[in-house]
Image: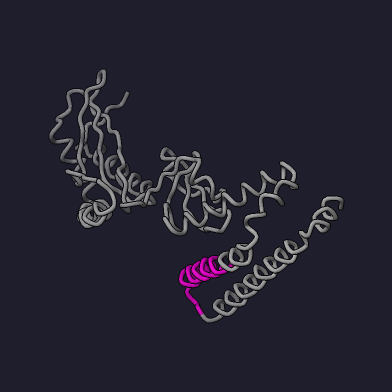
């Protein structure tokens, strides 16, 4: 109360009026957003279209709201630091984090380091982006590469400011596809060419894998406008290495980041069939 009386005594009541107007503007825009969401929920039947429309409207309304509030506060910006000096250190830190998250949210919406449905990895967490808000974004967590990167069902809330302070990996930036590798062990005296041919037949028989190189060529042409990225080889390839008493083959191929486990399951199922038919000489320790 002493701080409040002090502020009123020295003519700072105008700031409370501006603050009240700012809150009113924000409340009005929240109501407008709510009404639009309510109406479109009845009119737009397709859930994905409805969700994307709601997100777009939310972004537009937030930008307009911020601009109006900035215009409202512009004449008083010179004196803002005087007011801030009366605020405790704890509140100042909290406000700093909120402001940083707001700016980071604007950066995400303008620069788009990721967008809805992208698979990303940030601060050691991997997941699919399901929601982007003003202060944070939410991802649907998936497991690591060992567990096939399948959904755990957990929604993780991450502050927007993490895009500035943490390492961000986007599985979909520039390309929709990523490289995956499968290691196969063969007997040391195995017929290398025959085994390689059988392995290539298996991986190329998968529709998803066989179609990706053609699609990737088109994506590379578009991606080189923004990124200096080149690939000389896009088709599945096998690298050979002798390890102790067996031959190690590393099968490398392009895949969709959300289909790695399905493709690996397809490959191993068919490889075991070939092994039982004695067409592949798998190493069994």
Answer above or below: position of 119 versus 238: below
Q: Is residue 273 left or right of residue 164?
A: left
x and y percent of residue 284 in the render?
Answer: 30, 26
Q: Which residues are magenta?
A: 44-65
**How many discs mark residues in the rendered view?**
0
Q: Is residue 18 in sight in this rendering? A: yes
Q: Is residue 14 left or right of residue 103?
A: right
- The secondary structure that dominates the magenta segment is helix
Toward the viewer: 19 or 116? 19
Answer above or below: position of 40 versus 196: below
Q: Is residue 157 in sight in this rendering? A: no
x and y percent of residue 161 in the render?
Answer: 54, 47
Q: Is residue 31 magenta?
A: no
Answer above or below: position of 9 versus 86: below
Q: Is residue 200 left or right of residue 102?
A: left
x and y percent of residue 251 in the render?
Answer: 25, 38
Toward the viewer: 246 or 269? 246
Extreme-front residue of the structure: 10
Answer above or below: position of 262 versus 191: below
Image quadrant in which you'd find residue 69: bottom right
Image quadrant in which you'd find residue 283: top left
Image quadrant containing the C terminus:
top left
x and y percent of residue 96 in the render?
Answer: 62, 47
Toward the viewer: 37 or 282? 37
Residue drawn at (80%, 55%), measured in percent from left and top? Answer: 7
């Amino acid at each position: 109360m002493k701080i409040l009386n002090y502020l009123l005594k020295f003519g700072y009541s105008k700031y409370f009026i501006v603050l009240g107007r700012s809150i009113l503007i924000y409340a009005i825009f929240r109501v407008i957003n709510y009404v639009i969401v309510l109406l479109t929920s009845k009119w737009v039947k397709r859930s994905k279209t409805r969700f994307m429309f709601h997100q777009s409207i939310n972004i537009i309304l937030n930008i307009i709201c911020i601009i109006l509030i900035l215009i409202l506060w512009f004449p008083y910006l010179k004196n803002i630091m005087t007011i801030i000096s009366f605020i405790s250190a704890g509140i100042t830190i909290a406000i700093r984090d909120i402001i940083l998250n707001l700016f980071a949210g604007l950066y995400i919406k303008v620069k788009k380091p990721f967008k809805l449905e992208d698979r990303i990895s940030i601060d050691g967490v991997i997941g699919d982006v399901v929601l982007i808000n003003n202060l944070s974004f939410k991802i649907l967590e998936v497991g690591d590469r060992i567990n096939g990167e399948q959904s755990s069902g957990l929604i993780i809330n991450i502050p927007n400011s993490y895009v500035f302070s943490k390492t961000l990996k986007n599985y979909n930036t520039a390309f929709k596809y990523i490289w995956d590798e499968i290691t196969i062990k063969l007997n040391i005296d195995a017929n290398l060419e025959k085994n390689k041919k059988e392995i290539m037949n298996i991986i190329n028989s998968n529709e998803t894998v066989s179609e990706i190189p053609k699609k990737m060529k088109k994506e590379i042409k578009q991606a080189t406008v923004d990124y200096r990225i080149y690939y000389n080889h896009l088709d599945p390839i096998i690298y050979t290495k002798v390890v102790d008493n067996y031959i190690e083959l590393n099968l490398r191929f392009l895949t969709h980041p959300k289909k790695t486990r399905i493709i690996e399951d397809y490959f191993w199922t068919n490889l075991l069939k070939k092994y039982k038919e004695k067409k592949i000489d798998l190493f069994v320790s």
